[in-house]
Amino acid sequence: MLRFLVRRLLQTIPVLLIIIAATFFMLRLVPGGPFTAEKNIPPEIQRNLERHYGLDRPLLVQFGAYLRDIVLHGDLGPSFKYPNRTVNEIIADTFPVSLELGAESLLIALLVGLPLGVLAAVRRNSWLDHLCSSVAMTGICLPTFVLGPLLVLAFAIHFGWVNASGWSTPSDRILPALTLGLVYGAYLMRLTRGGMLEILNQDFIRTARAKGASETRIIFRHALRGGLLPVVSYLGPAIAGIITGSFVIETIFQIPGLGRQFVHSAFSRDYTLVCGTVILYATLIVACNLLVDLAQVWLNPKLKFE
């Protein structure tokens, strides 16, 4: 297992380097810049700003200095949009908000997706199965930028139960977490149903039934562990997607998280903040996939780390 972990950690180094390089150079290829003339900055001040931030140096030199600061000091550089603030400080302030939203959304997705998936598989081809499958398909087909405003119209404007936007009270978490969690819950329901159906048709399940094991024992003792393997495989990218995919949700509900900050930084050509956000999210995705691999081996010992 130790060899597996070391090998996987070493494999992440070139992956992250490629992501950093691709993001860095693609940002420079985009027309405009953080201090371009389109922002009505006098040319002399613009040149001084570019010299101050090192943007007047050759591109490879800029990349080398940026990479050196990250590797040696963990420094993601200064923000071009917010004077006197570093990217590290902005991420430290905003990422906990995105993380909280992601955790609440994931909890909703698990609480909705897993029970409904198991229920649909156990009651296969019944009206309950058709109802759960229809609800899941509706959730999959509804994008978050449609579901979010619909929930706002119903629960914030029509009933007036919660605020339409903001992040100041506990109730402000309900609509954004529901919007993100229900969509991923629909995917989890479909995967759980498929995995459980495959396991419930195995010979060892029929043997357990022939021996007189109760249906509850068959589901929770024998079927659930193997039936959740597809769900576990999906959870790694899903967790990363829930956290990184909150750009739209944070924009709709005016949540001061990193996703909303990322959107603003992209429009204002804040190179360092965009790069820092991409690096953070790429690291999260790599870490989540590694945890999924470990969980898969734990659920199915037949799988080997090698």
Image (tube, rainbow, N blue to C red):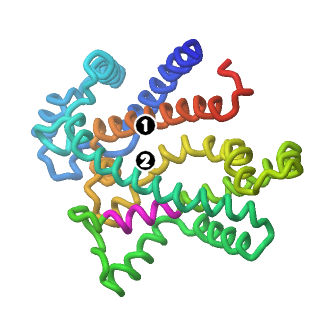
107 vs 135, nearest the viewer = 107
The residue that mark 2 highlights is 244
Residue 93 horizontal/vertical position (percent): 22, 44
* Disc number lying in front (1 or 2): 2
**In the image: residue 112, left or right of residue 97:** right
Rendering quarter of residue 55: top left
Q: Residue at x 44, y 77 (%)?
A: 150
Pick the residue in front: 14 or 36: 14
Q: Residue at x 42, y 29 (%)?
A: 20
Mark 1, secondary structure of its residue: helix
Asked whether residue 177 is drawn in magenta, I would say yes
Mark 1, Cα crowd under 10 Å, few <14 / some 14-19 / many 20+, is few
Q: Which mark is residue 26?
A: 1
Q: Is residue 250 visible?
A: yes
Give, as a single range, the part of the protein colored magenta: 173-182
- The dominant secondary structure in magenta is helix
What residue is rendered at 20% in x and 45% in y?
81
Compared with 109, 172 (above or below) is below
